[in-house]
Amino acid sequence: MNMNIHFRDVQSGSVEARAIIEITDGVFLNEVTILNIDGEIVVEFPRKSFVGKSKRTYYIDIITFEDNDKRIVWELEIKNAYREWRKANKKVLIYEEK
């Protein structure tokens, strides 16, 4: 499987980038987040949240996988694509003078 993935840089805390993945021709999954947690690249898929009657927040995965193996394959492919993209697009740190 060769996904068409587009990344955009994010300069915010542990968030490295956001990805848009073309799932099939003309169908896109937005807001896949690439995180750097303690030096490890982590893929976070989008979720919907809502507050229930009990005032508790619930989360629903936007995309689900038939099994954990399928999820791991997707994550690995996204991580590899991100590393290749990052090689070509170095992170530019911007410092503000105070």
Image (cartoon, rainbow, N blue to C red):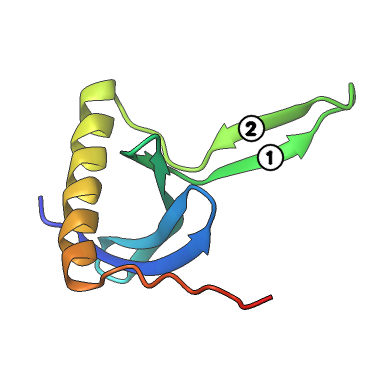
- Residue in the image at 54% along x and 51% along y: 13
Residue located farthest toward the bottom when viewing the structure as drawn: 97
| Location of residue 40 in the rendering, given as x and y in whole percent from the top left corner | 31, 37
Give left or right: position of 92 versus 67.
Answer: right
- Residue in the image at 39% along x and 34% along y: 38
Give left or right: position of 53 versus 67.
Answer: right
- Residue in the image at 17% along x and 72% along y: 88
Which quarter of the image is occupied by the C terminus?
A: bottom right
Vertical position of residue 96 compared to residue 78: above or below:
below
Looking at the rendered structure, the kind of residue marked 2 is: Tyr
Q: Between residues 76 and 51, which one lies in front from this camera angle?
A: 76
Residues under labels 1 and 2: Cα distance? 4 Å
Marks 1 and 2 in Cβ contact (< 8 Å): yes
| Location of residue 57 in the rendering, given as x and y in whole percent from the top left corner | 76, 30
Looking at the rendered structure, the kind of residue marked 1 is: Ser
> What residue sits right under mark 2 in the picture?
59
| First along the sequence among labels 1 and 2 | 1
